[in-house]
Each structure stands twice: as C-alpha cells, then as structure tokens.
Image: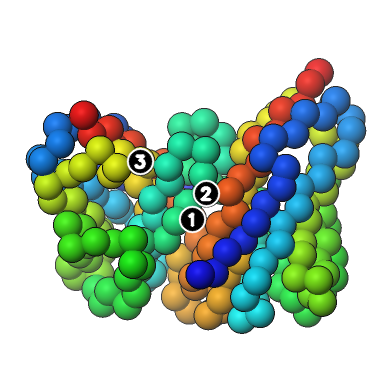
Amino acid sequence: DTGVSQDPRHKITKRGQNVTFRCDPISEHNRLYWYRQTLGQGPEFLTYFQNEAQLEKSRLLSDRFSAERPKGSFSTLEIQRTEQGDSAMYLCASRQGRGNYNEQFFGPGTRLTVL
Amino acid sequence: QQQVKQSPQSLIVQKGGISIINCAYENTAFDYFPWYQQFPGKGPALLIAIRPDVSEKKEGRFTISFNKSAKQFSLHIMDSQPGDSATYFCAAGDNAGNMLTFGGGTRLMVKP
C-alpha cells in the first residue's frame, strides 16, 4: 500500500452515463497526477495538479473529461457521456512538490468498464 | 509526439537467470528515467531510477544502464526470482521528473 487511495476500485456503467472517480493522495504531497492505462499498455498521462491548480492537460483529455482538486487535497475525475473507448484503468499518483526528481507514488487504480 | 519504445513485450527467464529489458527515447529534453514494476490489480511501483549524468546505477539485483548518445537505457535483473514475475515499465520524464512518458511494458515470467 503506497498511501494513495482510489475509489471505487471497479466501476461498470452503460454508455452515455456519467462517472466520477476519487483519489486521495499522500497527505504531504502537493502534486497529484491522473493517468489512463488500457490493457497491455503503459500508463498515459492525463493531467496534473499542483495544490488546487491544474497545470497541465493532455490532448487525451477530451471535453467530456474534467478533473478537480478543491483545496489541494483529494481529487476527482469525471467522465461525462461515457463511451466504450473510455474503458480502462484510471490511475492516480502523488508526489512531493519540494525538490526535483521525486518519486510518483501510484494508487491501485479504478477499473472502468463501459458497456 | 514524445515516445518511449520498450522491448521485448514479453520475456521468460529461468530462475537465477538475467532478465534484460530495453528502452529507447526520442526527446532529448528527458532528464529522468525511472523503471516501474506492476503486479496484477496493483498500481505501478518505482523500482529504480537514473538521471543522465551517470551511465549506470545499481540497487541490489537491479541495474539500469544508460547510453545518452544512443538515447537508450535498459534494466537488468540479476538472479531473477519467481517473485519478480510482473510487468515492467520504463518511463522518461522531463521538467525534473514531473511529466512521465511510459513505455508499452514488458511482461516478465520467471520459471522456477
């Protein structure tokens, strides 16, 4: 257990429904990252926060995706109008902001299946 | 597009053997090269990392070799054990390791 928790661990939804995932980072980490991992592939960067500010977004993050980190603590990732192509593992990671080259600690992920 | 290419996709090694996984990158702005280990149902966990100012880093049975001119780096697992059976990802980071680009992964199986 890395100290990064994600909820839920699994989510099955029907196409067109909205889903929201939550990530609780390690408490002293001010940087938080979201990645998407499809079966047999490496994680792909989606977005990251420094405290409550969203500083970078990948082009993979379409308009249907939105992420928030109110008060710089936990973060949520919402997918609106889900599509079958959204089926993947959504990983959250956190990292200390002070200093460079610090390790990103990953949570266990939320596996999304869109029927 | 920034890419990190990883090979092989899968690897079978006998217990006690050496496992070697290779990665190549394109973007010379990358300045941080970690390797992650992932077990089924778990998130990736950092195994070992290197910066381009050194050509080799060793931690226990795990060694990273780095060739800056060739833009390649590799992971060597010495005395491979069945417990090492997992998927391994190389990654490359820029902005002091803030942004990571991952390779496609190598599924390692160590036979007893």
The answer for how far apart the CA atoms under marks 3 and 1 are is 19 Å
Q: Amino acid at mark 2?
A: Gly
Task: Identify the residue at horizontal 19%, vertical 70% (top origin).
Answer: A71
Q: In the figure, is residue A96 to the left or right of A47?
A: right
Disc 3: which chain? A
What chain letter is assigned to the residue under label 2? A
Measure the C-alpha gap from mark 1 to mark 2.
15 Å
| Label 3 SS | strand
Q: Amino acid at mark 1?
A: Phe
Tag 1 residue:
A105
Question: Dot 1: within a 10 Å radius of its alpha carbon, few (fewer than 14), some, or many (20 or more) residues?
Answer: many
In this view, B36 is above or below B41 = below
* Numbered circle sitting on residue B48: none
Res B111 quadrant in image: top right
Is residue A80 shown left or right of residue B17? left
Determine which residue is flagged by label 3.
A88
